[in-house]
Amino acid sequence: MSDTPRTPAEITARVKALESLLTEAGIMSPEAVDRMVEIYEHEVGPQLGAKVVAKAWSDPDFRARLVANTSEACKELGISGLQGEEMVVVENGPEVHNAIVCTLCSCYPWPVLGLPPNWYKDPQYRAAIVREPRTVLSRDFGFDVPDSKEIRIWDSSSELRYWVLPERPTGTDGWSEEQLAALVTRDSMIGVGPTAPVGAPA
Amino acid sequence: MNGVFDLGGTDGIGTVDVPADEPVFRAEWEKRVFPMFALCFRAGFFGVDEFRHGIEKIDPAVYLKSPYYEHWVHTIEHHGERTGQLDLDELERRTQHYLENPDAPLPVVESNPELVDFINAVVPAGAPADRPTDKIARFAVGDVVRVKRDSPFGHTRRARYVRGCVGVVTAAHGATIYPDSAGNGLGENPEHLYTVKFTSRELWGDETADPNASVYFDAWDPYLELATTEGAAS
């Protein structure tokens, strides 16, 4: 086992060598790689979670179904899949703020948020968010949660995939789901940031 | 196993580096590695729990300092060798070849459309972990439970920071694949899964804990016992 991290040139060569062997063995192909990358670069991302949140804000019946069985409700919008087979949305409210983490690896709800940002997978966030959540949110993300609000951290230690249903911003009465979805940031669904500021409806 | 990957509550490793924006993949090699998880899973290299355990066995210094997708390379190599599907000596020879000839092309093989079909099928379908079981759930919502102190040497999801701590069961999810079995190559052996709420005070003590915070942690039936002494659960 190597005990020093590889240089960029070394990791590039190592991966190319690995790909060459796996390709010759029929295990992978350039077409399969390109398709998988295309899906997670362009098709599956936080815009899907935003769509779900906007619908939940607009449709109380859908919201109830979403909270009762998140994965089934997401399927109504054609949203499902890898690393989100059993999703659980957790609701922010006046008394409670939620955020997600995976302290043991990097579990993240891919079908609604896409692939995680690097900081989510890095040791620093995984170490600190369970220990001093309010400090991490304020110091590292510039996101202040008042002491009066309980912070709940959801550590994804099983195959359940948690994500956050943020509060609907005030001043959005009468907005369409499309307009509302534009306010839903990735970070607001992780729980490390606010929804976007409310301007005039687009 | 007790290892550096089990990061919850670790101090002294710095603040979170949050760039304003970044691409989904930061380098071309990351794009090549990402699909290997699904494709090597298809080829029988590992289940997801074994995949994680392969990452846990990385040299701790490398684990903490290497880019995320390099972890994947390590576990794919580990399980490729373990299952007899990858020759690490040949991998080393080819690595040297590409180091000395970075522009040398990949081998060209006849395309297999089944691999693209697999990707298109598995991404929306996923691979659910829930399983039927005859076992009786030993706990119910509202139970006050303690995470046993056990420190297995193999794969487990009982993070150190919750061991010995007392919390309240907030949800019971039925049975799923048991990582302490599946991750060690011992079969799925489904166990009941619960979510347990721990107050920060219970996890970190009154002196340093946020007085108004909690952690929700998923735990399998064998991780837990009914608490016989009061903790900070209430």
Image: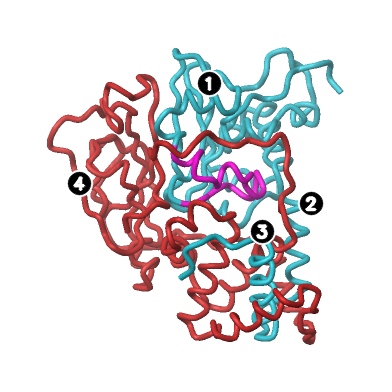
**Eye-nearest disc, 2 or 4:** 2
Q: Which chain is the one coloured red?
A: B
Q: CA distance from mark 4 to mark 1?
A: 32 Å
Q: CA distance from mark 1 to mark 3?
A: 31 Å
Q: Nearer the viewer, residue A25 or B221?
A: A25
Q: Please state the extent of the stretch shown in magenta in the rendering.
A: A105-127
Q: Output the chain of dot 3.
A: B
Q: To which residue does mark 1 refer?
A: A93
Contact? badges 4 and 3 (CB < 8 Å): no
Q: To which residue does mark 2 refer?
A: A42
Residue B191 in picture, x, y percent from top left: 33, 59
Q: Which chain is the one coloured cyan?
A: A
Mark 1 or 2, nearer chain start: 2
Q: Is residue A46 left or right of residue A136?
A: right
Q: Amino acid at mark 2?
A: His
Name above or below for residue B7 compared with residue B142.
below
Residue B225's disc is: 4
Q: Is residue A69 magenta?
A: no
